[in-house]
Amino acid sequence: MDYIEVCMEITPFKEEYAELVIAMTDEVGFESFSVEAPYLKGYIPQKDFSAHRLKCVLSYFDNGGDFGLSYTYSLIPSQNWNRIWEANFDPIVIGNLCTVKAGFHKGLPLTKYNIRIDPKMAFGTGHHQTTSLMIRTMLQMKFRGKQVLDMGTGTGILAILAAKMGAGRPVHAIDIDRTAADSATENSRRNRLAGAIKVVCGDASLIQTGKYDVILANINRNILLEDLSTYSRGMRPDGCLLCSGFYTEDIPLLEKEASRCGLRKVSQESEDNWAVVRFAKE
């Protein structure tokens, strides 16, 4: 399938501005986005693309505001698409404990937990630091028998790792993007975990009250702030929320909201100014 890539330059660039653009362009029909600051790139099947509709929607940002936006678009022939996501997907290798790779990665070490995924259109923004931070912290935790939710599952990496680490079955995985949810389902099967992971397309409103021992959320700061109270309600007493997808300077803001929701910060780590924080339910 041929795709149209819409390259939107955001000036000045901030993650929250990119999230606002994503929210405002819902009707354009993008299947996925990638963030390569200062650019937000959106991908839509050529058959669904309308230059007029795109112009009308993005004209919203022509009236001043906190940031400026300009854009260009170009055709990505189907025969080139695999090369694009392959070029943007680096394997993750954490010591002798965990490897996350695609089928085209060769010569990587065999570790305790080996996860094979096919990113395709659901590969997200390419922020490998947040994924590796989540994985490193998960590897220090105990999952056996625990009920786990992977919120904003994307390709399903964290849900797959939780299942491989012995989490109670099924591990629940939720993503608001249908392409991502389908990708996570496919990757669960690829790792022989079809019966161990239940993937649902939707948002935080699907979280069941008092259901989870561990909630994993590798999502951006604004969504975390909005949904922290829902996550807290979904956790059992002494439950754990492990979250990433934000910068170290965002931690005080998240910690304040988490405290309001009955969550206490237990630990934090960072890599290249990206952060992961572990909260416990009081």
Image (cartoon, helix red, strand yellow):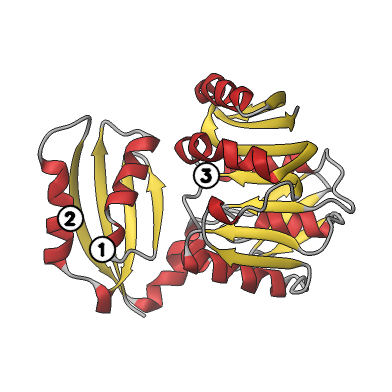
The picture quadrant where one finds residue 18 is: top left
Q: Earlier in the sequence, mark 3 or mark 2?
A: 2
Q: Are marks 3 and 2 in contact (CB under 8 Å)?
A: no
Q: Is residue 63 above or below residue 28?
A: above
Which quadrant would the C terminus be assigned to in this image?
top right
- Give the amino acid at mark 2: Val
Q: Earlier in the sequence, mark 1 or mark 2?
A: 1
The picture quadrant where one finds residue 114 is: bottom right
Real-space Cα separation, disc 3 to disc 2, in angstroms: 27 Å
Q: Secondary structure at mark 3?
A: loop
Q: Disc 1 marks which residue?
A: 28
The residue depicted at 23 percent of the width and 64 percent of the height is 74
Q: Secondary structure at mark 2?
A: helix
- Give the amino acid at mark 3: His
- The 10 Å Cα crowd at callout 1, few under 14, some 14 to 19, many 20 or more, is many
Q: Earlier in the sequence, mark 3 or mark 1?
A: 1
Q: Disc 3 marks which residue?
A: 127
Q: Is residue 237 above or below residue 168?
A: above
Q: Disc 2 marks which residue?
A: 57
Please state which of the two labelled residues, at mark 3 or mark 1, is closer to the viewer: 1
